[in-house]
Image (spheres, rainbow, N blue to C red):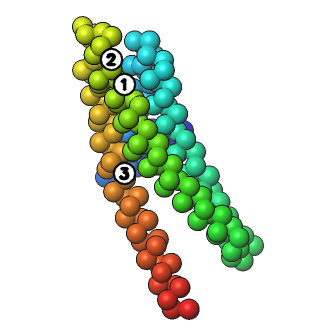
Amino acid sequence: MYVYIYVYACVYRFYYIGVMVLFLHVCMCTHTYVYACVYRFYYIGVMVLFLHDISDVILEGAKTITYFRVMDGKKHKMIKNAGDVGFATFVISWFLFRLYWFPTKVVYSTCVASLHFCRDGAFYLPFNTMLFLLYCLQIYWTIFIIKLLIKYVCVHICICVCL
């Protein structure tokens, strides 16, 4: 998936701010994985990989389901409802994995707990800077998710009120 995003960013040549932020996010994730493997922080690398990619898999699944809501010229309500459930699952997983577990497990363990084990590590500042910037990018994407969620809820409330 990361190779796809690199190609996508090169094709669109950063015309949109979202593509640039997405490219920065993917670069930070990739560098964090590589840095964790080089300095033998395998558990941290696996945690970062898991906590990021689980939300991405759910998002791609929900998008795929949503693309199939119109088949053969007909709108399928059951597929639309499955897409809605997929989006709700994505939002819950985003807040749980990226905004709760990532800072409490990964960032805390590398910033605070690692000071007790290795005080002179050359990895400390660059690795924690990458993790913190990754968390800042997640907060940036969270703003868009909240806006999309508000728009989604408002549209469904308007539909319910009009009926």
Of the 4 image quadrants, the one containing the C terminus is bottom right
| Residue 39 found in image quarter | top left
The reply to whether callout 2 and callout 1 are in contact (CB within 8 Å) is yes
Q: Is residue 37 above or below residue 141?
A: above
Q: Is residue 64 above or below residue 4?
A: below
Picture disc at residue 114: 2
Type of the residue with mark 3: Trp
Q: Is residue 14 left or right of residue 71?
A: left
Q: Residues within 10 Å of mark 3 (few under 14, many from 20)?
A: some
Picture disc at residue 67: none
Q: Is residue 137 above or below residue 85?
A: above
Q: Residues within 10 Å of mark 2 (few under 14, many from 20)?
A: few
Q: Which residue is mark 1?
A: 109
Q: Is residue 37 above or below residue 105?
A: above
Single out the mark in the foreground, 1 or 3: 1
Type of the residue with mark 2: Ser
Mark 2 and mark 3 lie on one chain; the one further toward the N terminus is 2
| Image position, residue 94 (x, y; %) | 46, 49
Label 1 SS: helix
Residue sitting at 26 percent across and 28 percent down? Answer: 129
Residue sitting at 33 percent across and 10 percent down? Answer: 117
The reply to whether callout 2 and callout 3 are in contact (CB within 8 Å) is no
Label 2 SS: helix
| Count of numbered tags | 3
Q: Which residue is mark 3?
A: 141
Label 3 SS: helix
Type of the residue with mark 1: Ser
Mark 1 and mark 3 lie on one chain; the one further toward the N terminus is 1
| Image position, residue 4 (x, y; %) | 52, 40
| Residue 151 found in image quarter | bottom left
Q: Residues within 10 Å of mark 1 (few under 14, many from 20)?
A: few
